[in-house]
Image (cartoon, rainbow, N blue to C red):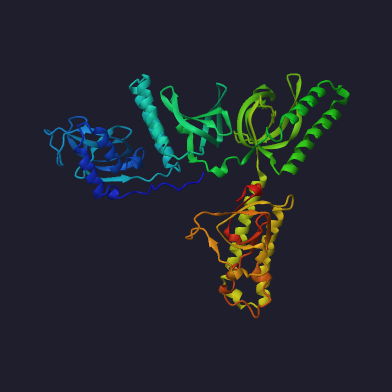
Amino acid sequence: MERSKPNTESNSPELFSDEDWRRIAGANLLLGEENDEIAIAEIEQAAHAGDIEGERVRVVGYSQSEEDDSYRLQSVEGVADLISPMEIDSEIPAPFAIYTKEMAALCVRTSQNDYYFPLDKQAIVSIELLPDDSSIPRCVRKLRHYADKIEEAAGIGDIQDVESRQLLIDEINDVLNEIPYDDGIQVKCQAYKVKIDGRENNVEDANSAVLSGWLPSFTWRDDRPVLEMFDIKNRFTTFCVDMKDVLDMAPIDKEEIGASIDLFETVFNDDFQETAWQLATDLSYVDKSEFDEVSREYTQTLNDQLSEFSATRLYDISTVGFTGFALAPDATKNNELQYEFMDISGACIDGVCFVGYHDKFYAALEVTIDDESGGFPKKIYVMPDRDKIIRLEGFDSEAEELKMAVNELHKIANFASEVVNDKCFYKLPLNEQLDVLSQYECAARNVIQDISRVREFKGECVVSACRCLPGDLLNAVSWNDVPLEEVNSREYVEEFALRADNLAIWNPEINDRPDIDGRILSLSELPLSRGEPVLIVNNTEENKYYLVRCSDVISLSRNDPSTIS
């Protein structure tokens, strides 16, 4: 969940520019009339309310005393709260010009008092945004502030009427909507609740959990707003999270959605469950003298199915994530197995076994999870049954393998680039120069061979730059005469998604240069590769070949080639 961090460095008194103060003064003149809402909105924008509300600030200026309404010069450190209209009594002496009956005031809250500072350039000496070292992002801090503020308002004011409570919820949902979550949202938290078919289960994870949800919104829980969202993998499941337990929030990248595999649709499908149920039922009738042998045989049958699936589909089912009820030893009952609700993102499968529970046998996944109390890893039993488990996911190891392959190509390209940018390279004789470049080419070739070892790569290669030749001109035209097409050039603004029916590492500057005489004297003699390994991408459908430097490869995926234009 990476994002650019908000600027929380201490700001100078120039947090408000002269133009900001002019806008605030003009809007103050509109207060007390029919345009109050428009005036406050203008002031909030000019005063950067979206940036400072809920943040710790230091304000030096004149605030109004609660005792006698007089103005006192004070330096206050606290939390910036609402900007609201404040009546100005012309009979009370003020150390700033009074030109209106109402003036917007910034509320700064401390543990002892609330201080109201009129928003006027003469009334405020400086406003300083204090640095935040909590590592909690700004959007989370702001939502926490609103949740606390609304809870306080609802509790103190005993607000129970539907319309008023809806207005308060709308207020915090407006803040939530500042996060662009069209493709879903990820919430990292240390505790949450899961609602399934109206039943609610508490989940407390000392290591924190990352929830992926969609359609997030705040709803009431007693007098406090809590965040609710549908599980992005299961629309019948709802997550409920209190903002005090939230550590981070970020929109979900489209590419991240679907990275996991629904194991109920793939591995533990109806056929597997029927086989497992039949074997477990048969096991209940096996004679005790034969039980151990038959149990081993049945267990091997199911484990063989898992091994076969993993080998042929390239999905990693050694590590899974699941949500639901698993059988776990209860230390308070002599480690007797009891159902326990869990939500685990990384559990290690040791294999399939048969477990006895209440005089019946069940096929179950033998799973190892970390003990939340910090003790030894704990062994639990997960039944691959939708009646017990609502989410059972594996991970697309092939997608991860292709991502790692691209990273390896980039590393190799960087190493090669460092070599050819070193003056020492150009002092070597030609044969040694070619040997050096060939070593990096060989390393890149091994990467491509690895991703085609189990199944030949066919799919899509997304690149930021390439050269293209029709197949019938491949041996007639030099690659040096083919122009480089680059993203962000005048003609191209998007990445190139190339259909890839075949991939190969082949550098024409090394492998197709019989005219080399003497050593390479400068990088300008390697305009195609710049010394990097070069990838040849073949589109057999259109009989085209693409020449791509390894550093220009953005991603590889085994999409259906027929869908790639």
Q: In the visual, does 21 lie left or right of 264?
A: left
Residue 286 location (% of width, % of height): 85, 22
- Which residue: 76% across, 20% down? 360
Residue 106 showing in the rendered view = no
Image height check: is 183 above or below 199? below
Which quadrant holds residue 324?
top right
Q: Residue furthest left?
A: 91
Which is nearer the eye, 233 or 63?
233
Q: Considering only vertical position in the picture, is 484 above or below 12?
A: below
The picture places residue 178, in percent across and down from the top left corner, at 41, 39
Q: Position of residue 504 (x, y in %)?
A: 68, 60
Residue in the foreground of this view, choosing between 197 and 351 = 197
Residue at 56 percent of width and 28 percent of height? 237
Q: Between residue 306 and residue 88, name the one nearer to us.
A: 306
Q: Nearer the viewer, residue 292 or 564?
A: 564
Query: What is the quadrant of residue 319 in the picture?
Result: top right
What residue occupies the far right of the structure in this picture? 289
Left or right relative to 131: residue 410:
right
Q: How many marks?
A: 0
- In the displayed structure, does residue 519 sit left or right of residue 308? left
Q: As drawn, which residue projects farthest toward the bottom?
A: 518
Q: Is residue 487 visible?
A: yes
Quarter of the rendering containing residue 325:
top right
Tell whether 354 sits left or right of 108: right
> Residue 135 location, x and y as percent?
45, 43
